[in-house]
Image (cartoon, rainbow, N blue to C red):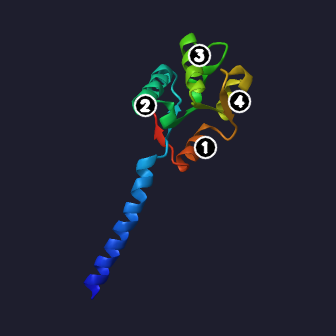
Amino acid sequence: MQRRHLLAGFATLSGLFSLSSPARAAGPDKSKVVYHLCDMDKVAFTLGNIQNHYDGVGGPEKVNIALVVHGPALKAFHAISASPDTSSKLEKHIKTGLTVNACGNTMKAQGVTQADLLPGMVKVDEGGVVKLAELQSQGYVYLKP
């Protein structure tokens, strides 16, 4: 008798799993990834990784990518001193959907305002590390090149 109930339970569970399979096959959710950038010497590498990520998954329509910048790396995004390569790559990524978060604490420490940063960057008043934790709690995969 117990064996029959156990088998019936497995049959019910397998039926539930088979009902959910077509929905997943029809259109999986976009993956979500947050890149953490704090080292000045990793700026070009990280922007390259983001491009490789878009290319690897089949384009920006397949993934939501956020970038959180704080510490010394934020200096690379000061509009007055940003390299042309950094400016052009960032602009391209923002146009394809990248969200770029600038740590408000670092901005204060470096004496810059949002107007002093490259266009499209978003000031994070609560701080970069808080934003990283928030995004991870929302299901973003954390990457730190």
The reply to whether discs 4 and 2 touch (Cβ–Cβ < 8 Å) is no
| Separation of residues labelled 4 and 3 (CA atoms) | 22 Å
What's the amino acid at mark 3? Answer: Ser
The percent coordinates of residue 22 (x first, y second) are 41, 54
Callout 2: SS: loop
Callout 3: SS: helix
Label 1 CA crowd tier, 10 Å (few <14, some 14–19, many 20+): few
| Separation of residues labelled 3 and 1 (CA atoms) | 26 Å
What's the amino acid at mark 4? Answer: Lys
| Separation of residues labelled 1 and 4 (CA atoms) | 16 Å
The percent coordinates of residue 47 (x first, y second) are 49, 23
Choose mark 3 or mark 1, whichever is in front.
Answer: 3
In which quarter of the view is residue 20 placed?
bottom left
To which residue does mark 3 refer? 87
Residue 6 numbered mark, or none:
none
Callout 4: SS: helix
| Separation of residues labelled 1 and 2 (CA atoms) | 30 Å
Label 3 CA crowd tier, 10 Å (few <14, some 14–19, many 20+): some
Is residue 113 something one can see in this rendering? no
Q: Earlier in the sequence, mark 3 or mark 1?
A: 3
The reply to whether discs 1 and 4 touch (Cβ–Cβ < 8 Å) is no
Instruction: Decide: is 86 above or below 74.
Output: above
Q: Which of marks 1 and 4 is nearer the N terminus?
A: 4
Instruction: Decide: is 144 above or below 27.
Output: above
What's the amino acid at mark 2? Answer: Gly
Q: Which residue lies furthest to the bottom in this view?
A: 1
To which residue does mark 1 refer? 130
To which residue does mark 2 refer? 58
Which residue is found at the position 61% from the left and 43% from the top? Answer: 130
Residue 108 numbered mark, or none:
4
Choose mark 1 or mark 4, whichever is in front.
Answer: 1
Is residue 40 something one can see in this rendering? yes
